[in-house]
Image (spheres, rainbow, N blue to C red):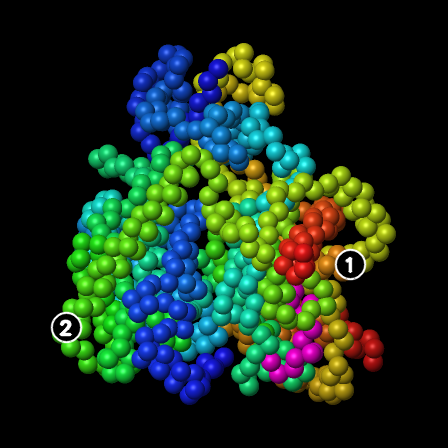
Amino acid sequence: MAFLDFRGGSGRVQIVSKRRATCGRHSWSPRVGACVQRTHLVRKRALLGGSNKPRLHVGSGAMEGAMQTESKIRADSRTEPGPRGPGCSLRHFACEQNLLSRPDGSASFLQGDTSVLAGVYGPAEVKISKEIFNKATLEVILRPKTGLPGVAEKSRERLIRNTCEAVVLGALHPRTSITVVLQVVSDAGSLLACCLNAACMALVDAGVPMRALFCGVTCALDSDGTLMLDPTAKQEKPQRAEHCWEALRDDHHRGCPSGVEYCALEAPVGATWWDHEARAVLTFALDSVERKLLMSTTKGLYSDAELQQCLAAAQTASTHVFRFYRESLQRRYSKS
Amino acid sequence: MKETPLSNCERRFLLRAIEEKKRLDGRQTYDYRNIKISFGTDYGCCIVELGKTRVLGQVSCELVSPKLNRATEGILFFNLELSQMAAPAFEPGRQSDLLVKLNRLLERCLRNSKCIDTESLCVVAGEKVWQIRVDLHLLNHDGNIIDAASIAAIVALCHFRRPDVSVQGDEVTLYTLEERDPVPLSIHHMPICVSFAFFQQGTYLLVDPSEREERVMDGLLVIAMNKHREICTIQSSGGIMLLKDQVLRCSKIAGVKVVEITELIQKALENDQKVRKEGGKFGFAESMANQRITAFKMEKAPIDTSDVEEKAEEIISEAEPPSEVVSKPVLWTPGTAQIGEGIENSWGHLEDSEKEDEDEGGNDEAVILDGIKMDAGVDVSHIGSQDAPIVLSDSEEEEMIILEPDKNPKKIRTQTISATQVKAPSKKPVKKRKKKRAAN
């Protein structure tokens, strides 16, 4: 059984027949008002794992004429059997310290494909206008990869600065400045958490006194409430699927897992599907001593029970991150 | 942060060493430092390391309308940023001279040499063309920024793939990355800058100066060349006076160096393409050296989240119950509502005396001429406790203001300001709450 999906909207459309009755092989397009044959290539959707199997697109929801219906995509078979399916897992981590010669401390932190480079200068001279008489002035600068820094960067800088101020022992270095410069090298999801981790490792490399280490963990909540830790860019953002018509046959109908009721020949007009819809994305910064919460920023809709669940999951994940920190520092400083 | 000045003894040492044909890092006069090129997972992203100088380059594209005088050509945009982590002296306001000089040189090298075919970037003449944007970030400054930046720019441009577009008559189809493989840019040649530093009024010359050598140099000559020995740009700065044969000699050296560097770039690009085609792992994670003790990797770690629900329930059950729900908003007039009661007005004393005055008949005349109005007759003492004229304040007497544009303005004792219109007139002012009065 071949399940093909075609691109709706723009694209080459060749009208095969204006009579619905003759619409057998080809898909009836209510919008065009005729049976159409798509003339360009069958598009194969890349799944998470990047497989090329054609995906099953089914939609639920009654026809509502011209109104847009939102239906969800359910892949009938996940081609990636990895641990990210039912459970949660953190992506592959890598960290390199002291890679830049000019800053006092530097670290490059990689989480899967997301990579952030951090450089720390400090404690160093501070401008009189910015000096604080009894503690160090902490400054965080975040630069995106393309374009000029905007408001999103400013808000992230502020979040990172607040986290750092909570752990750095600024009172030991009054009238100095500690500057943390972060450069986004690649962004593939959980950017803020990666920035926090890179900043922490860079501060450690610079020898800035801190009362605890900190780490960032991102959680995403699916539309059914499934928790995903360390989400990729695809999992964080809802993706809009194109209109999709299929020549479903009756025997497929019966075997369809989600009990599709409608006939594909009468596909709803303007139906959109959401791919891995993230209802909410929550980022937490946790400290290493007691896994207490240093900073949290969230986007989206969630209940308070879900918030506590995400926080508990983040605390469990942070144990792994701190173990990673410890092992990487042990590798560097141990004598054997 | 201010730049640490170079000490005199260091300066003398460097100059003396150069006179004896010795360099701090042991290189020969015409030697380049090690060049290392690594690519990221997205197309068009690369990091170039020239010794310790590190530059990150990223190319991105966008469909825009073309410039009016060049309707059939795409647009190229270059931007080199000296990140603050590259050197402590690179603060946002302070590096403008150097920044302008480097950006201008880079533009001349890449744009004016026409190394990229801009005609091929045209999609629909006069309407849609590709705008290619090259962002370069200097991550670490150890001298010779311009060479590293030009290498990073050309490598990123060669590595970049733009989405495929097809035009059929009036229809333009832009294919996503999953539909059709992205298409590389059409690049004619690869111009690369080579820098020469001059010392002692042009007597001594060094190729690829490091940061210390740059501090003591007299002048800099930059030659941008491609492997076909075509000079794309020449720039001499610093006020040194060079002889003709010196410039010729430099161009010959540059020719040799550029050929070597171009070979290196081609090899790196081929390697990356091979790895991608074979499905191997690519990206910055792979190019991180494993054997360094400062580098550490950890594989995917599954996390056991089975007990999160119990933990969450525990926390919620132990938590204090939320405070009483605030009373529902009270709607005074259409468009004016109140939530909560606000704090007591601390200007109690003044208010009392004012109220006495009013009782004696000094009405606040709210002259209403039309629609929304600002109440100018309100006691000045009360304005201070109100944030904005439109906010209905709670801590004083509230009386409705009835605004009737057609009739005569009603003389209503008003102490609040409301910027809404009420259609139903009521003759008497409605006194909603008189906390102060009750208290008194």
User: Taking A325 as reference, is A209 above or below it?
Assistant: below
Q: Give yes or no for residue B81 being in the magenta stretch.
A: no
Give the amino acid type for the residue marked by disc 1 in the picture.
Glu
- Left or right: residue A236 versus residue B304 is left
Residue ID at (57%, 21%): A260
Q: Secondary structure at mark 2?
A: helix
Q: Determine if residue A38 is in view.
A: yes
Q: CA distance from mark 2 to mark 1?
A: 70 Å
Please provide percent x and percent y for residue B440: 83, 80
Residue B403 sits in which quadrant?
bottom right
Residue ID at (72%, 75%): B396
Please provide percent x and percent y for residue B218: 29, 81
Label ID, residue B245: 2
Residue ID at (46%, 43%): B282
Residue designated by label 1: A290
Residue B153 sits in which quadrant?
bottom left
Q: How many marks?
A: 2
Dominant secondary-structure state across the stretch colored magenta: helix
Give the amino acid type for the residue marked by disc 2 in the picture.
Asp
Residue ID at (55%, 55%): B292
Q: Nearer the viewer, residue B436 or A227?
A: A227
Q: Nearer the viewer, residue B383 or A74?
A: A74
Q: Nearer the viewer, residue A45 or B158?
A: B158
Residues marked 2 and 1 touching at CB (< 8 Å): no
Q: Residue furthest front?
A: B20
User: Taking B230 as reference, is A30 above or below it?
Assistant: above
Q: Residue furthest left?
A: B244
